[in-house]
Image (cartoon, grey):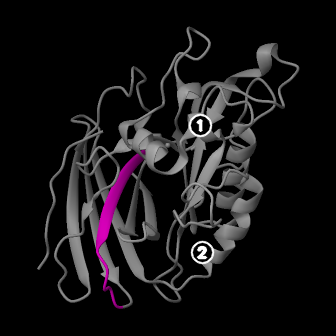
Amino acid sequence: MKASLYLLAAFGVIAFGSCDYVKNPYGKPASTTTPPSSGYVKKVLVEDYTAVQCINCPKASEEADLLRKNNPGRVITIGVHVGSLSAPLGSTFPYDFRTTAGNNYDTQFIQADANGLPSGMIDRVSWIPGTFPRSVSDPTQWSGYVVTRLAAPDTVFLQLTNTYDTVARSLQSKVKIKFLTPHPSAYNLVALLTEDSIVNPQKDIDSTSLPNSIVTHYMHRYVLRGAIDGNTSGMGSAIPTLTGDSTSTTILYSMPATFNGMAPNYKHCRVVAFIYDTGSGNILQTEEQKIY
C-alpha cells in the first residue's frame, strides 16, 4: 500500500575563503544521478556544524566541499549553523542561520558551546568510542570515515522528485523508498531544505589581513534552512507502510518569503532526504535534489 504524507513546516552548508570575496571554488555542483550500471548507489551525508563567528570553521567547510567535489553524486553535504557563535551581532553579522532542527541536532549530538566548533557527523555513525555521541571535531578525519561509509553495502534506495510553484511558493516532494536488504528495525524519514551560495560575513583565521579576520563577502554552502517534513525537530517520522520492500510518500511544503529575515534564492534550494535507523541513529541512505 502506498501511503502519502502531507506536511507543512520550515531548511544548509558552507564554503571557505581567505580573501574578501569568495567565489564557488568548484563551479557548478555535481549531479546526483545514480550510475546506470546497478541502479543503486550508497550515498553519504556529511553534516558540517559551523558558525559565522567561528574563526576555524572555514577550514572544516573547505573539507566538506572537497569531499563533495571528489565524490560527485555520492557525498551530500549540509552546513548546520549552531551555538552562540551563530547569533547575529549588529551590522557585522546581521543574519541568524540557526534553525529549530539544527538546534535540536546540536543538543543531541554536538553541544557546540560546551565542546567547540567546528564539528561534524558522517552518516551519524559513532566513530570514536568514548567521545560525545557521533561528533567528529577534527575535519581531517572526515575523509577516512566517508571512504568507509561509501564502501558499506547498499541497503536502501531513495528517489526524490520535486515540483515547485514559484508563484505560490509551494513545494511538492515525492519520495520513493525501496529496501534492498531485510529491514528488521524501525526507520524514520527526514526531509530537510538547504540553500547554497549565500554570501554573508564569516570569521576566518586565514584572513588575518582583513579587519578582525572577517570576510565580508563569504560564500556559505548548502546552509540548513529547516525541516520540511512536518517535524520541525528534524527527527522525521516513521516511514509509511511498506508494500513488500517499497513505499512512497509525498511531502507538501510552503516556502516562506524569508528565513529569519533573509529572502532565499529558490534556484539554490535543495531537498535533502535521508532514512535512519531509530535504534542506532545511523543514516542508511541520503538523497538530494534541487527544488526546481
Amino acid type of the residue tagged 1 in the rendering: Ala
- The picture places residue 190, in percent across and down from the top left corner, at 34, 58
Q: Where does the image place residue 222, in percent across and percent down from the top left? A: 53, 45
State left or right for residue 258 relative to residue 15: left
Residue at the spot x=48%, y=30% of the render?
97
Q: Are marks 1 and 2 in contact (CB under 8 Å)?
A: no
Q: Residue 205, how many percent across, how many down?
A: 81, 30
Q: Residue 94, image x and y in percent?
A: 53, 15
Query: Which residue is tagged 2?
Result: 149
Residue with the most extreme front position = 130
Q: Is residue 263 in sight in this rendering?
A: yes
Query: Do we see residue 291 in this rendering?
Result: no
Q: Which residues are magenta?
A: 182-193
In depth, the one of 38 and 249 nearer the eye is 249
Marks 1 and 2, the one that precedes in the sequence? 1
Residue occupying image coordinates x 62% and y 12%: 92
Residue 114 marker: 1
Residue 3 sits above or below residue 204 on the image: below
Task: Please tell me whether residue 265 belongs to the stretch shown in magenta.
Answer: no
Residue situated in front as seen by the camera: 107 or 203: 107
130 is higher (above) or lower (below) than 28:
below
Q: Name the foreground residue: 40 vs 232.
A: 232
Q: How many marks?
A: 2
Residue type pointed to by label 2: Arg
Q: Report, in whole angstroms, how far the alpha carbon at label 1 lies from the one at label 2.
A: 28 Å
